Image: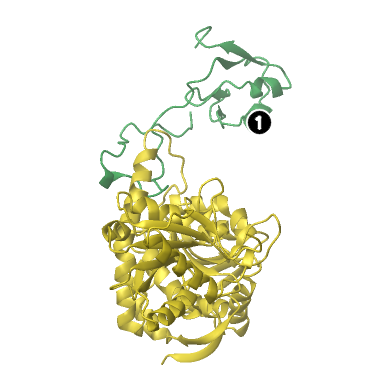
Amino acid sequence: MSEKAFLSGNEAAAHGVRLSRPHVVSAYPITPQTTLVEKLAEFVAEGNAGFRYMMVESEHSAMASALGASMMGARAFTASSSQGLLYMCEMLSYVSGARHPVVMVDANRSTATPWNIYGDQRDALSMRDAGWIMLFVESGQEALDTVIQAYKIAEDPKVMTPVMVNLDGFTLTHTYDMVEIPAQDTVDKFLPPFTTANKMSLEDPKTLCQTVGPDFHAEGRYLQQEAFGFAKVIIDEVDREYETFTGRSYGGMIEEYRCEDARVVLVAMGSVVGTTRIVVDQLREQGEKVGLIKIRSFRPFPKEYFKQLQKKFDAMGVIDRSISFGFEGTVFSEVKSSMYGSDTKLSNYIVGLGGRDIPKSLIEEMFHKLFELAGGKDDEEVQFLGMRWK
Amino acid sequence: MDKPKVNHDYKPPTSYDEMFFGASNGVGILPTVNSGFRTFHPEFDHEKCIKCMFCWIFCPEGCIDKTEEKLAVDMDYCKGCGICAHECPRKCISMVKDGEHDE
């Protein structure tokens, strides 16, 4: 039987990890990820975790250990945030290039300097090209469910690519909500034990993490790109299959919310999706034709979805909690390039940096700006909103 | 000489289906010799050599072979770095330009 509990996002994610039956958890604590790995350590202390907890001396070692465990055919988990994620950066491409399906949680947090422990998505988005599947969640419940889904996606024989599950620091990691924890036997039926031929074995010895020079390197990279193509299908399939076991699904790569006859929509990723949902409901009650597109999978990016939108909406705004200096918001670039050739008017709103609150009034301001844009107003493409000064 | 043999039967992948997975490959595959950038190679004066094994322990490529009565060098993998000659306490190893002497 599933049970309900009042959990923080980090605790919910920890239950997702426990239910996925990893063999090894290796992690180094960092705010705001700490309470997640503390919860995992607590499961071990209680004596019924079923996994080994490796205490390591750094995030680099945390990911290296997860890789080592995965190379033995074990199911491995780690988690980090911000500077810790940057420190394990080198190992991220080791894991993805060698095609070991490690799952990690990143508690999204800004990157220094100036030093800041609060939430934005600069850390994860700077790892965009590390070769990891990157999923972003909206709630603690989705964090729990997505960790379980992540193993199923990562370990799919056609995918065999690690997955990073992202939850916004503090806004999700440290806020509490009622969460349904699925029963272990339900998860066991959904997620069978991990088996792979890509492991160290005395019966079938292999060279692991070998050198590949110019003669075969590009072909391996081509296969990695192909795996991300398969992942686009698998992410949707796994999400639908999960629904048959638990009754919950999240749209796979993408979710449209009240977009049917919308004139303007906001594109959002992470916890701000929840706030935007409420604002959409409120504006809809007032008769405004607004909608929301939630990006759940940032890598692979739902390019085909955005491409087919064509001129469905008059104007679209992309909310970014990060910026690629000298260009524009990171998510905005992806949406804009996916929609190449469409003459839908696009705007990019940079908000919530370093943990700054994104209140409902700010989302309303965005929709207001989008209606003006749709009406023909000439507006700056990239705008910082919610700023202290004009 | 007791050394890994070059596997002349090794066939590299010929299609994506045969490609090795990620960064994993079989073992015992020695598809090529690797000494292409050598300019000088070591030659032993076996009269002076006392088989102290300094060369054997210092060679970064493990190219010194001690299975026979006299020490020998695996020229398929010797890069010609000269560490053996430098470390030899009896100075009985000389570095000779490839193509000269007995090579």
In front of the other: A208 or A120: A120
Please give left or right for residue A42 compared with residue A281 in the image. Answer: right
Residue at the spot 62% in from the left edge and 54% down from the top edge: A87
Identify by letter the chain in green: B
Would residue B51 appear left or right of A344 to someone viewing this image? right
Of all residues, the one furthest to the top in this rendering is B100
- Picture coordinates of residue B17, whole percent (x, y): 26, 47
> As drawn, is A383 to the left or to the right of A41?
left
- In the figure, the shade used to draw chain A is yellow
- Helix, strand or loop at label 1? It is helix
The location of residue A165, given as percent across then percent down, is: 48, 67
Task: In this rendered view, identify the residue nearer to me: A276 or B62.
Answer: A276
Q: Position of residue A286 (x, y in %)?
A: 40, 82
Name the subunit of mark 1.
B
Q: Quadrant of residue B32?
A: top left
- Residue at numbered disc 1: B58
- Does A293 appear above or below A330? below
